[in-house]
Amino acid sequence: MPTTLQRIQVSVTPDVAKALARAQAMWPDLPASQQLVKLSVAGAGTFSTRPARHQVLAELRGKYADAYPPGYLDDLRDGWDWPGSPVELRKDWR
């Protein structure tokens, strides 16, 4: 369709294919090009509506990596011995 808007080409990488598969479930009647537009707009909205949150998360990422020693969760779970506790279920976690 003729347009004066700039066009781009997008290669369908494995990540793009996964996104398009999800979009197909949401908008089955739209062609892939329009699904990609909806995905792009929705994705961009997550960044523009919460920039402060993203900035805080970026600043905190890895800051407390040493707060809990290796094996911390296993040690914590060893104390759980009540019925239905994760200790009984833990064998399925590994």
Image (tube, helix red, strand yellow):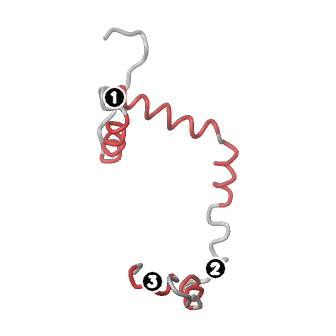
Q: Give the crowd class for mark 1: few <14, some 14-19, many >=20 residues within 10 Å.
A: few
Whether tag 2 and tag 3 are in contact, CB under 8 A, the answer is: no
The CA span between labels 2 and 3 is 20 Å
* Amino acid type, label 2: Tyr
Image depth: mark 1 or mark 3 in front = 3
Mark carried by residue 68: 2
Mark carried by residue 90: 3
Looking at the picture, how far across and down is residue 22, in whole percent?
35, 42
Q: Based on the displayed image, in which of its 4 quarters is residue 35 positioned? A: top left
Mark carried by residue 87: none
Along the polypeptide, which appears first: circle 2 or circle 3? 2
Which residue does the image show at 43% across and 14% down from the upper left?
5
- Report whether 2 appears left or right of 84: left
Image depth: mark 2 or mark 3 in front = 3
Q: Based on the displayed image, in which of its 4 quarters is residue 38 positioned? A: top left
Looking at the picture, how far across and down is residue 66, in whole percent?
64, 77
- Report whether 85 appears left or right of 62: left
Q: Give the crowd class for mark 3: few <14, some 14-19, many >=20 residues within 10 Å.
A: few
Mark 1 = which residue? Answer: 9
Along the polypeptide, which appears first: circle 2 or circle 1? 1
